[in-house]
Amino acid sequence: MKVALIPMPVEDGNFETNWKEFERRFKEALHHSPDFIVFPEYCLTGFREWDFSGAKLYGEIVKRVSTLAKNNAVYVIFGLLEPYKDCVYNSALLINREGEVILRHRKFQEPMKFCTGNTVKTAKTEFGKVAVIICGDLYNKRIAKWIKKKKPDFLFVPMEYSPESGKISEEDLKAMSERVKLLNVKTFIVNSYPPGGAWVFDEGGNLLRKSSGDKLLIFEV
């Protein structure tokens, strides 16, 4: 199983610019013949507090990404804003090689103006069971219980994390490592740029590979 993690730059509220970057980085990843291409949290709209207008693009975004996945026979994981009745979820989707949404995760760890998720699901692939969580979910106690219950073979974590220092610190990496060790699952994390970064951890929380900034990270299991 070959995974491409793409820490792409995201402009808040600029869908067409983000889409061009998404396509460009998608094509870059295809040169490595990946099975999974993974993008950050709400990577096609960004999010500026409390502007939920990007949720109106949900249908268009799913249509476009599904087409890319189907035309290139690749799994795609990415974050987006999902409208639901009178509120919005911070969600992430797994789209299969046929362009079908086979997994949706709704973020648990969100402030009050978002709807929040309450379950973790898995999807079966030819490589094993896959789960997806989002950014701060990694540190959520309820998420940990769900992951231990569902026992996925692989966990994917799209992020949008921008520390005050402007860069990912050793303390940040240690915190990720400790949580992955607790979850006991091979984990792939990708952050939007800046500051960007992508990381792969084994079940014991050991860092196997990383990239910095907006550099593509390829990892083969």
Image (cartoon, grey):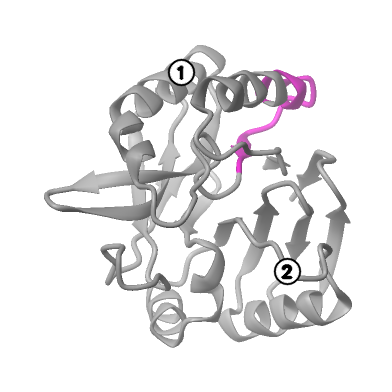
Query: In the drawing, what numbered circle is on residue 15?
Result: none
Residue 37 in magenta stretch: yes
In front here: 13 or 22? Answer: 13
For residue 43, which quarter of the picture?
A: top right
Q: In this view of the protein, which residue sits in the foreground, 151 or 16?
A: 16
Callout 2: 10 Å neighbours few (<14), some, many (20+)? few
Looking at the rendered image, the quarter that the N terminus falls into is top right
- Label 2 sits on a secondary structure element that is loop
* Closer to the camera in the image, 17 or 8: 17
Residue at 51% x, 42% y is 78
Residue 56, compared with residue 70, is above or below; it is: below
Residue 73 point in image, percent of width and height: 53, 20
Q: Which residue is mark 1?
A: 70
Classify residue 32 by image quadrant.
top right
Q: Is residue 78 left or right of residue 56?
A: right
70 relative to 221, above or below: above
Residue 204 shows in the view = no
Element at badge 1?
Answer: helix
Counting the numbered discs, the total is 2
- 37 shown above or below 167: above
Residue 102 image position (x, y, % from top left): 34, 41
Q: Which residues are magenta?
A: 26-39
Q: Please name the amino acid that badge 2 sits on.
A: Pro
Residue 65 lies, in percent from the top left, at: 46, 24
Q: 142 left or right of 19? A: left
State the residue position of label 2. 163
Q: Residue at x 65, y 65 (%)?
A: 186
Whether residue 49 sits left or right of residue 162 in the image: it is left
